[in-house]
Amino acid sequence: MSEKFPRSPYDAIGGLVYFRRMLDKIRLFAAGELPKVYHPHLGRDFDGRCLNLLHVKYEDVRRQALAGRSDEEVLAWCYENGREPSNEEIETWSDFMRKRGWRDAASERIAFRLKEAGLEHRAAEAVTMFDFIDVDEGRTPPDFSKWQPPR
């Protein structure tokens, strides 16, 4: 089987970033298509942050995803069996996750990962961990330079 990357961490559901990526990783791993470099991080790191926000366990979410439920159905299950964060909590968490690595304790990690992957020439595009993930997986991160707040 060929390896496939999960979708971008920026791909949100109900305002919640990263959740869909975690589900992709679960499904790709079960199908034998998730690159091995991701295996030790399943249910940990950013997955763990998302699980903690929702107050659910990785194995429970894994069972739901592998039972053939859609992303929307798995998220609804998390809200029913863990907790449903308020819109403000989702916005705060998603904003934090989108900015992780930008002028914070993870900044050095991004520089290290770019060098490790031979992608230093794309450092201007990869200022956050989400940006690095997209660059590392061959995607172009979204351009937030022209972003305007909703009116």
Image (cartoon, rainbow, N blue to C red):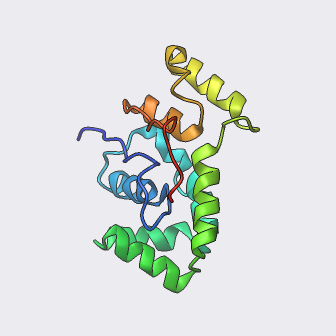
Left/right of residue 93 with respect to residue 15 in the rendered view: right
Left/right of residue 43 with respect to residue 65 in the rendered view: right
Q: Quadrant of residue 5?
A: top left
Camera-side residue of 107 and 62: 107
| Residue drawn at x 63%, y 29% as measured from the top left | 110
Camera-side residue of 64 and 129: 129
136 lies above or below 17: above
| Residue drawn at x 47%, y 70% as measured from the top left | 61
9 lies above or below 22: above
Q: How many marks?
A: 0
Q: Quadrant of residue 105?
A: top right
Q: Position of residue 16 (x, y in %)?
A: 50, 62
Viewport quadrant of the N terminus: top left
| Residue drawn at x 44%, y 73% as measured from the top left | 75
Q: Position of residue 23 (x, y in %)?
A: 41, 60
Q: Position of residue 12 (x, y in %)?
A: 43, 58
| Residue drawn at x 59%, y 31% as measured from the top left | 127
Q: Position of residue 87 (x, y in %)?
A: 57, 72
- Which residue ends up furthest to the bottom in the rendered image? 80
- Which residue ends up furthest to the left in the rendered image? 1
Can residue 45 be seen in this snapshot?
no
Can residue 22 be seen in this snapshot?
yes
- Which residue ends up furthest to the front in the rendered image? 151
Camera-side residue of 31 and 134: 134
